[in-house]
Amino acid sequence: MSSRMRQLVWSQLFLGTALLWLLFTLNNQAWAQDKIREAPAPMYRDPIYDGAADPVMVWNQEENSWWMLYTTRRANLPTQDVSAYYGNRIGIAATKDHGQTWVFRGYLDLEFERGWNTFWAPEVIYHNGKYHMFVSYIQGVRNHWGGASHIHYFTSENLWDWEHQGPLTLSSDKIIDATIFKTTEEKFLIWYKDDSRGGITMVSTSDDLINWETKDVPAIGGGAHEGPKVFEFRNYYWMLTDEWKGLRVYRSEDLQNWEKQGMILDKPSSREDDTPSGAHGDVLVFGDKAYVFYFTHPGRDSHAVTKPEQSFHQNHRTTIQVASLIFDGETLKDNRSEPFDFYMPDLNE
């Protein structure tokens, strides 16, 4: 074979190899673009008491990571009646890989008076360089449901150290489960459950987060519910409420008038521990994507009914899950069993 012929053969081999490499690279890029970052299921289980509930997600400005604050029920310690749901502290879990893995970081120290007291369902917003927490508070630990309950206001500069600002004066002394929304008029709205009115949602307004004006008209009436969550997505305002059989969807154009719609998270999922229904959720919106974070009672066939043949732990343990919210042009839906792309971006990206 002549020298020129050998050069031609090597040239063709080189071009062929380069073409194969290019096709391989393009195929890999296309595969990577199509590959979803699947959400973990369960997303989180509390490693101490196995009773994480009522999650709220907040971006930690100092640590550059997402934090989840939640009610810490003592699910693995058999107690009388519902006392495992009292005396709860607020737990902390953090993720540094955009929601794929979560690490328990400890508990918040929120005690402002003597004794062992009860904290439920935190709500946290970041405003004017500070974190503002609105958390349900009941004095002491009870064996049965009851006790005066209020929303207490705390502030922090680092999410660890909280200064107690006092209780809010709202519609009664039987209120829990706050959700806060800042309007375009630099005012704040707070919705919450009022048990003195049969467990419906009331609303109050403020321009300083301390002094609140309450209308005597329910924001959401009807049957009892809890855990309201308000957010903006796809050019509408939305409210989710917990009906103990899934989350009810409400839609609004003005944050005042709410159109009752269907349910989400009301049917069991095929994912691990994602049954029977979703309860007391939080929502994060990133552009055209929205994720709902919620808790489940995976040892039960329905949210509120325990099984007498099971242990206390099996009946009371909870898991935190996440699902994608789907806007169909009219309302919100979910598909808990189908994989979806789950990615919590850094807010400083």
Image (cartoon, rainbow, N blue to C red):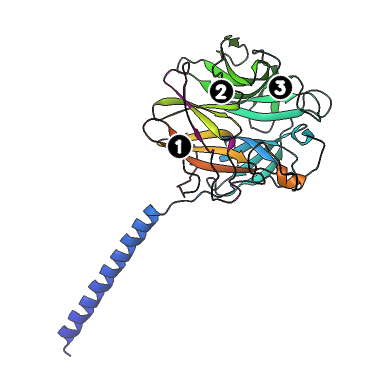
Callout 3–callout 2 Cβ contact below 8 Å: no
Pick the front one: 260 or 36:
260
Q: Give residue 44's position: percent from left, percent from top.
A: 62, 46
Disc 1 secondary structure class: strand
> Quadrant location of residue 202?
top right
Work out which quarter of the rendered image holds the N terminus and state it.
Answer: bottom left
Q: Earlier along the polypeptide chain: callout 3 or callout 1? A: 3
Residue 57: image location, x then y, percent? 57, 35
Residue drawn where x is 59% and y is 22% of the image: 223
In the image, farthest residue toward the bottom: 1
Q: Which residues are magenta?
A: 250-279
- Specify whether 232 is left or right of 7: right
Q: Which residue is mark 3?
A: 164
Residue found 77% across the figure and 21% down from its top: 147
Question: Mark on residue 180?
Answer: 2
Task: Name the N-terminal-most of marks 3 and 2.
Answer: 3
In the rendered image of this protein, does residue 307 appear above or below residue 247? below
Of tags 3 and 2, the one toward the viewer is 2
Residue at the spot of label 1: 333
Name the amino acid, label 3.
His
What's under tag 1, amino acid-wise? Lys
Of residues 70 and 11, which is closer to you in this image? 70
Q: Reply yes or no: does residue 130 show up in magenta.
A: no
